[in-house]
């Protein structure tokens, strides 16, 4: 069965500093990989996704992530953090459903990002 | 931008009562899902729905749970006899096809007392 590990429960960075959130996955085939962001009391917003092709993926809000097959990782990065980036970030792997042609997500436990002004 | 709409945003129910959570997926999407997030825990898959039938379900999705698409727009999750441990945030999601990311609704917080 697939799994996702986000080793950092809570990260604090200063506004303007760079950010890297770690994600490792376990999946038997080439994965679909995702990063979602959740602000308090809100739903899950898709930041970026990887299905195939270029291993460096650009997303919304200036985020990017790099798929490294050899390390089973899909780390999220941003060169300069803004105070509005404070939220919880979830990495997820998509496992293909047999037959129906879609996939289901397995999420990590999330990393809470705090930003110091 | 199209949205997945969930109602109500917060539902309080007594243990043993039936509850129905409502979702309106994006109109041209084909696959529909329910996930839940117990406070402080991971977001967990419950069920996927395609072509008017369940395509996959998790171990959590037992006989107390059911889903329905009663018309062309709504997608509901019913819990027949709620338990305290059903208290969670329930997210509905939809996708157009397998090569697209999910669009999640803003969730329904279910509190069972």
Image: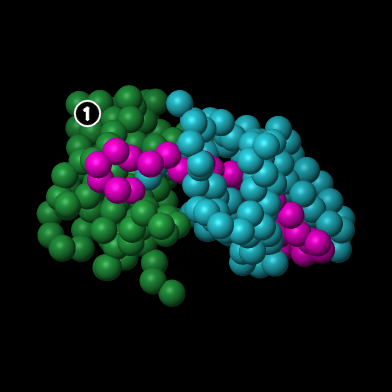
Chain colours: A cyan, B green
Residue linked to disc 1: B64
The answer to which image quadrant residue A83 occupies is bottom right
Above or below A101: residue B3: below
Q: Where is residue A113 in the image (x, y as percent from the top left)?
A: 73, 48
Task: Say whether residue B101 is left or right of residue B70.
Answer: right
Q: Where is residue A32 in the image (x, y as percent from the top left)?
A: 49, 47
What residue do we see at 38% from left, 41% from top?
A: A96
**Element assignment for label 1:** loop
Above or below B51: residue B81: above
Q: Position of residue B89 (x, y in %)?
A: 43, 42
What residue do we see at 39% from left, 37% from top?
A: B45
Task: Say whether residue A34 is left or right of residue A72.
Answer: left
Q: What stretch is highlighted in magenta?
A: A76-102
Task: Say whether residue B22 is left or right of residue A110.
Answer: left
The answer to whether one can see residue B13 in this image is: no
The answer to whether one can see residue A33 in this image is: yes
Q: Is residue B75 magenta?
A: no
Task: Say whether residue B20 is left or right of residue B5.
Answer: left
Q: Where is residue B86 in the image (x, y as percent from the top left)?
A: 36, 30
Above or below B20: residue A2: above
Pick the quarter of the image with the C terminus of chain B.
Answer: top left
**Camera-nearest residue between A89 and B108:** A89
What residue do we see at 61% from left, 66% from top?
A: A60
What residue do we see at 36% from left, 54% from top?
A: B98
Crowding around mark 1 (Cα neighbors within 10 Å: few <14, some 14 to 19, many 20+) is few
Subunit of mark 1?
B
């Amino acid at each position: 069965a697939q799994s996702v590990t986000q080793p950092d429960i809570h990260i604090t960075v200063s506004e303007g500093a760079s950010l890297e959130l770690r994600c490792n996955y376990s999946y038997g085939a080439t994965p679909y990989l995702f990063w979602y962001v959740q602000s308090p009391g809100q739903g899950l917003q898709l930041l970026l996704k990887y299905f195939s092709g270029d291993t460096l993926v650009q997303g919304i809000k200036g985020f990017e992530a790099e798929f490294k097959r050899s390390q089973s990782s899909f780390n999220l990065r941003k060169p300069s953090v803004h105070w509005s980036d404070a939220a919880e970030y979830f990495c997820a792997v998509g496992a293909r459903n047999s037959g129906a042609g879609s996939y289901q997500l397995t999420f990590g436990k999330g990393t809470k990002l705090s930003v110091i002004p | 931008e199209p949205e997945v709409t969930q109602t109500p945003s917060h539902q309080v129910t007594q243990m043993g009562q039936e509850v129905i959570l409502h979702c309106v997926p994006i109109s041209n999407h084909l696959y529909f899902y329910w996930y839940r997030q117990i406070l402080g825990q991971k977001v967990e898959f419950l069920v996927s729905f395609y072509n008017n039938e369940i395509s996959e379900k998790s171990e959590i999705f037992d006989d107390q749970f059911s889903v329905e698409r009663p018309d062309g727009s709504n997608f509901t999750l019913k819990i027949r006899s709620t338990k305290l441990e059903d208290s969670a945030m329930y997210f509905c999601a939809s996708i157009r096809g397998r090569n697209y990311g999910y669009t999640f609704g803003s969730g329904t917080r279910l509190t069972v007392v």
